[in-house]
Image: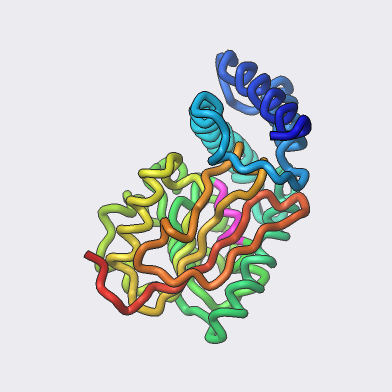
Amino acid sequence: MGCKEADLVSNVCEIYEKLSRLESLKPSKQVNKIFTQLVEMCVPPSPIEVTKLSKQVQEMRSKLIKICGEAEGLMESHYSAILGSFESPLDHLDLFPYHTNYIKLGKLEFNILSQHCPRVPTQIAFVGSGPLPLTSVVLASKHLTNTTFHNYDIDESANSLASNLVSADADLSKRMVFHTANIMSVTDGLKEYEVVFLAALVGMDKQSKIQVIDHLAKHMAPGATLMLRSAHGARAFLYPVIDPVDLRGFQVLSIYHPADEVINSVVIARKTAMPVA
């Protein structure tokens, strides 16, 4: 490992120590400052391969990803509640600090989807939509304006905040459906969707992520499309990484690694016709 990579690992470990000592991960000046430092550290393209780091660093990374996931959920709930206080919440989405990232990611995912699925999907499922379902909102309002989005989240309060955001919009309130359910208990219903999006924070460790993917492989319709978010280089300190080998029962169509401020890599795969045991 070169000096740059060693410095990066050292700096990420330092940030992890700071975050693990915090009493709360709710948005605050201190929390925001530390996470901004972490993101700025991990976003520049880096040749680092997190799977080849020491066991100690791998364990730190696993804990850091969970901390990042918890903080992201708290931040989304915080901003969803603020947006929900407006008469027309969707007119104020730019109050969310990462709104521009979601606009860019939505356009990127729509372009990738269009390349591999020439037919416009009528039904899309988004698994792990959370309290601020910006991917669904961006895709439904800007790119897939006749498609119905079924948003799945295990947390009833997250769905309540999310549905409140679209309830005042005559069009989106009809095309955004919210289901409070653990996706592992949804079986036949998955066959209805031409496209399933799997949020980066569903399955925070490798094993639970693979369990969800295996479940989708078992119950999605043959030929249906799975869109996943992964991470590459130093960005893998922030989010779990999906390897093509993890996608049993799917044919990987493409993997895209952004080099700009969009953090997540995008993986698109097609459900194979072969039954999954």
Q: Residue 205 in the image: x percent, y percent?
A: 43, 40
Can residue 173 be spotted in the picture? yes
Q: Is residue 141 above or below residue 26?
A: below
Magenta: main secondary structure equals helix
The part of the chain drawn in magenta is: 132-137
Q: Is residue 275 left or right of residue 228?
A: left
Q: Residue 27 in the image: x percent, y percent?
A: 64, 28
Quadrant (top left/top right/bottom left/bottom right) for the N terminus: top right
Q: Residue 159 in the image: x percent, y percent?
A: 45, 48
Q: Is residue 177 above or below residue 52?
A: below
Does the magenta segment cover residue 180? no
| Quarter of image, res 18 | top right
User: Residue lying furthest left in this view?
Assistant: 277
Q: Is residue 147 above or below residue 161?
A: below
Q: Residue 203 in the image: x percent, y percent?
A: 42, 45
| Quarter of image, res 151 | bottom left
Q: Is residue 175 left or right of residue 14?
A: left
Can residue 74 be spotted in the picture? no
Quadrant (top left/top right/bottom left/bottom right) for the C terminus: bottom left
Closest to the observer, 94 or 256: 256
Closest to the observer, 83 or 94: 94
Q: Identify the residue at horizontal 45%, vertical 40% (top origin).
A: 204
Q: Identify the residue at horizontal 49%, vertical 69% (top origin).
A: 252
Q: Is residue 115 left or right of residue 258?
A: left
Closest to the observer, 91 or 232: 232
**Colour treatment of the image:** rainbow
User: Residue lying furthest front in this view?
Assistant: 1
Does the magenta segment cover residue 135? yes
Closest to the observer, 223 or 189: 223
